[in-house]
Image: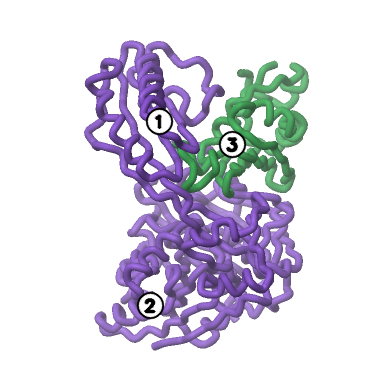
Amino acid sequence: MKVRLVDIAHARSGDKGDTANVGVIALDRKWYPLLARELTERRVADHFRGAITGNVQRYELPNLGALNFLLHGALDGGGTLSLKTDAQGKVFSTALLRMVIDVPDEEARTLGLPAA
Amino acid sequence: MKQVVRVAAGQGFWGDWLEAPRRQVEGGPVDYLMLDYLAEVTMSILQKQKERDPKMGYARDFLGAIESVLPAIVERGVRVIANAGGVNPVSCAQAVKQLAASHGATVKIGVVTGDDLLPRLDDLIARGHVLANMDTGESLTSVRDRVLSANAYIGSTPIVEALSRGAQVVVTGRSTDTALTMAPLRYEFGWASDDWDKLAAGIVAGHIIECGAQCSGGNCLIGWRDIPDLANVGYPIVNAHADGTFEISKHPGTGGRISVPTVTEQLVYEMGDPHSYITPDVVADFTTIQLEPAGPDRVRLFGIGGRPPTDKLKVSIAYRAGFKAVGTLVYAWPDALEKAQLADRVLRERLDRLGLRFDKIMTEFVGASATHGTLAGAPNADLPEVQLRFGVRGNDRAAVERFTREIAPLVLNGPPSVTGFAGGRPKVEEIVAYWPALIDKTEVTTGVEVIA
């Protein structure tokens, strides 16, 4: 079953220099393991291909039901150098939430996931 | 010892809501008002102001904030801690003193100094401190002649000293945002300077409230439609206990929301490696934080762990890095995006023919793809309007100036259905860029002065 990330998580993003961070938080704590399994560094790097020049790093915060992603080279130099509308990476959060993930039907039913 | 110490956040950055400090002091009982004014490049703006007038160089909004709370803080004994001092905390404190005197009040003011490394920069470099850029590894010598300001991020210790010497208002320069909240807790509860878990708890409390209402319903994605009464949003308050646990709350009768998800959104904001949130006082481990609901608009935090800090301080250096300008035009239906795309091609060709060279030219189509790029998918062919947003950056000021003359002509000599140019020619901005570096702690000596 296709599941939209925006239906199972919320997020906030910010900046450190030319790096944007995106914290993704499960809307229901029991969905966190699914996020941890599906939102790999590679998957997120693929999602943002062409939009960032550097790599993606991931950190796990099971205590918050959250994952933190660092998107390097995301902000055209960052801060005052950047010519981007989103020079401080404020809405990379919702850009990540555009992702759609594939979940086996039975697992989706067990977890009560909303279908896309 | 107090059972509970209440630290109220009144500003999340220079430019935040002018109403917030007064509302925090008058809306209910609080012990401390914490005001955070400094962002990464704020110091350089203040340095430029100080160059023009040696009495300037601090966040002048702070005087308005103090004026708005002055009778109340004196009556109620509320103490104020602010990093409003910028590159001139002494002048800031003098201005506060004069302001208080003009209202017939005497307020003891603590001034924290020692973060300003600009006068010592050449000496530090000569003694082998390369102040390498933490992101690129480059040595500071490559931009030394363009440096505008250099400040070490300093911790809670001098603020604690100012409080113990009786200051009611503490003014600092580049103190870390989180130290402004942690220091009064350390002072009130007598936490030892190596009580890592408690210091880390104070830092986490500071991180949660340092952006003002961003933890209490502001800029909050989860359930945003249902967050009540944002017009009357309540700014957050830390209610801390001696054991390092604390609750986040807001004054009764205010809008916004404090819940586990709203606080969690703020916890992940601007986060790097959550195992190591490095501050001058302690390294906090965000993977230890536990949250639970504690009543309406109240969240309890506990279990927070920390470990000893490093032997370095982060240094915030600002330097001149060329010029930029951004111009915009709006194209209307039908085929709004296609028209904006044609205008982009025309503009690029004209800049090319003029022989203007830039380090970077960036085009965005606001309304179609500016913030989410290709992730936004194929744009709707029927968009009512699209804004062409065209920016250039480079070291040649004249080239950037010349670019700013090329936007308006497009109104008459480019694609049709164009509007939105009433703002006039784009402004050329000098770029002041940020250079993060590290310095040995032993090189930085802070000072505290108390004036009355």
Q: Quadrant of residue B48?
A: bottom left
Label 3 is found on which chain of the structure? Answer: A
Q: Chain of mark 2?
A: B
Q: Which mark is residue B132?
A: none
In the foreground, B121 or A97? B121
Which residue is painted at 75% across and 35% down in the image?
A36
- Hue of chain B? purple
Q: Is residue B381 left or right of residue B154?
A: left
Label 3, secondary structure: give it. Answer: strand
Secondary structure of residue under mark 1? loop
Disc 3 designates what residue?
A10
How far, Cα to Cα, is label 3 from label 2? Answer: 44 Å
Residue at image point 56% right, 42% down: A13
In this rendering, is residue B77 above or below B375?
A: below
Check disc 3 and give the amino acid type: His
User: Does label 1 lie on the same chain as label 3?
Assistant: no
Q: From the image, tell me which residue sits under label 2.
A: B91
Q: Quadrant of the C terminus of chain B?
A: bottom left
- N-term mark: 2 or 1: 2
Q: Please give the name of the residue rendered at 57% of the width and 48% of the height, measured from the top-left corner.
A: A17
Residue B274 spot, x, y in % from top left: 70, 51
